Amino acid sequence: MTIDYRDEWVLSGTNRGSWYSEIRERFIERLRVRPDLVVISSVESMSLRHVQLSWFGTAEIRGVLTEAAHAAGVAAELRSKADITRALNPPRKKGDPKQRPGADFEEDEAFWSSVFSGTLQKKYRQAALLAYSRAVQS
C-alpha cells in the first residue's frame, strides 16, 4: 500500500463556522481525484467514559467531512481502533492467545516496512492503519 497524499491545514481566524466551510471546500477539492472510499476516525465507544470537550469539536469536523464526501459522490466510512484490531488479527478460537491491539501496529517498524512503501511520518500512522484495515477486510 502506498500513501501518496497527506496534508495539514492551518485554519484562518477564530470563527468555527468559517473553519467548517473552509475545511469542506478544501476537502471537496481533494476529492476530485475520486478515491474509492474516505475513511474517517470515529470516537471509540470505550472512551466515552472520559469525555473531553475537544471531542465535540472533532465530532463536528467528522460530520463536515462525511457530508463533503457524500456531496462529492465518494463513499465515507467511520472506523475505530477496534476495527483495526479486528481486521489485522486472525479470528480467535477458544484457547487462542489474546489478539494484538491495533495500537501495537503503530509502533511495529517491521510491519510498516513490509506493508507500506515510501516514507510516512509516524503521526500519520493511525490514519493509514484505518485505511489499511478497511482494505484488508474487503
Image: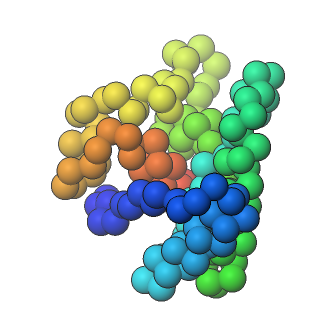
* Image quadrant in which the N terminus is located: bottom left
**129 displayed left or right of 6:** right
Q: Residue furthest front?
A: 13
Note whether 135 is above or below 100 in the view shown.
Answer: below
**136 displayed left or right of 79:** left
**Foreground pick, 136 / 32:** 32
**66 displayed left or right of 120:** right
- Can you give x and y, in whole percent of width and height, for residue 5 in the image? 34, 65
- Can you give x and y, in whole percent of width and height, for residue 49 in the image? 80, 22
Where, by quadrant of the figure, is residue 8 drawn? bottom left
- Can you give x and y, in whole percent of width and height, for residue 119 in the image? 21, 50
**Foreground pick, 102 / 98:** 102
* Image quadrant in which the C terminus is located: bottom right
Q: Is residue 52 visible?
A: yes
- Can you give x and y, in whole percent of width and height, for residue 46 in the image? 74, 27
Note whether 35 is above or below 110 in the view shown.
Answer: below
Q: Residue drawn 55% across and 17% down?
A: 98
Q: Residue drawn 64% across and 19% down?
A: 94
Model colouring: rainbow
Q: Is residue 31 visible?
A: no
**Foreground pick, 55 / 10:** 10
Q: Residue drawn 47% across and 49% down?
A: 127
